[in-house]
Amino acid sequence: MDEDKTIQRKPSKAKKVWNIISWVFIGCLAVFDVFLMVMRVKMPSSSSGLSLFRHQTRIVLTNSMEGDDEFYKSHPEYEIQKIPMHSAVRIEETPKDLEKQRTFFRALKEGDVITFYWSVSAQASVYTSDGDVITITHRIQSVTGSGDNLSYVCQGDNRVNASGDIVTISTQTVPAMMVVGKVTSVSVPYGWFLVNIVQNRYVMAALIIVPCLAVVVYESHTIVRLVKQDKKEQAMAAANKEAEAKDEELEELRKRIASLEQENSDPETNQPSSKENHQS
């Protein structure tokens, strides 16, 4: 009897690669969504900062730190150079421990860029009840005071107006206690794009829903495919079982036919004995 062999097809290399790419894409979207949701919680507005591990990420909303090229050529010692508008800046936060605070404030020097709280109404040291306190990122021009009474005179780098004329930019005298932190690095100016995404609930909803739908569609397709494959395998198994039963019946019939043929062709079985012939 010939044995039926069921050939199980293995997924092609192209399908395997497509599955890997699909899951990597969905995984990256999921990670990106988690990152955006963290930003949404930590940075509810464009003026807020995303704080992680004693460092903040903030968005510079104005061009006050966009000086001309000649300005920066004359100050090659500046660690932080031009900060384009809508750039994301990384800020080392002011420590909470008092001793570390003193060390941090004393280390700030002329040329450093700091982010600080500032009251629009008047003084940086006054928080007003009408909520006009903002954050500003400017460069330290000089350090005044001593001990625990340090202050920093700050000013923006952009000292050219819309007409291209050099103008005098006002300075801010910032008490140490109003310093949010020191700017340590500047990103390419795409931070504004991320903030807009975070603040737009419709975009956020789409970025969360689309990966979920992609997973649902992909898994639904996989489930349907597996169900069809399972039904097909069950049908093939039933067909194979039925074929095997028929083969067994045919084999049994062959054996019976062979046995009958053997009995009919045996001369000793068909010829009468000599005693029977004599009596007749």
Image (cartoon, helix red, strand yellow):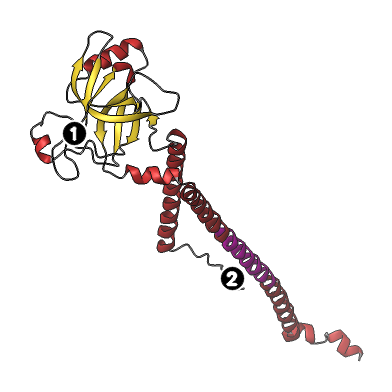
For image coordinates 59% across by 73% down, the residue present is 2
Provide residue 49's location: percent of width, then percent of height.
38, 32
Residue 6 x/y as whole percent:
56, 67
Distance from the alpha carbon under mark 1 to that under mark 2: 83 Å
Instruction: Please report whichever mark, 1 or 2, sits nearer to the chain's N-terminal start.
Output: 2
Residue 31 visible (yes or no): no
Q: Quadrant of residue 154?
A: top left
Q: Is residue 221 above or below residue 3?
A: above
278 is higher (above) or lower (below) than 47:
below
| Residue situated furthest bottom in the rendering | 280
Q: Which residues are magenta?
A: 222-242
Q: Secondary structure at mark 1?
A: loop
Q: Which residue is mark 2?
A: 4
Residue type for callout 2: Asp
The vertical placement of 261 against 79, above or below, is below
Residue 29 vs residue 18, the one in the foreground: 29
Q: Which mark is residue 157?
A: 1
Residue 45, quarter of the rendered image: top left
- Which residue is at the front of the view, 100 or 122? 122
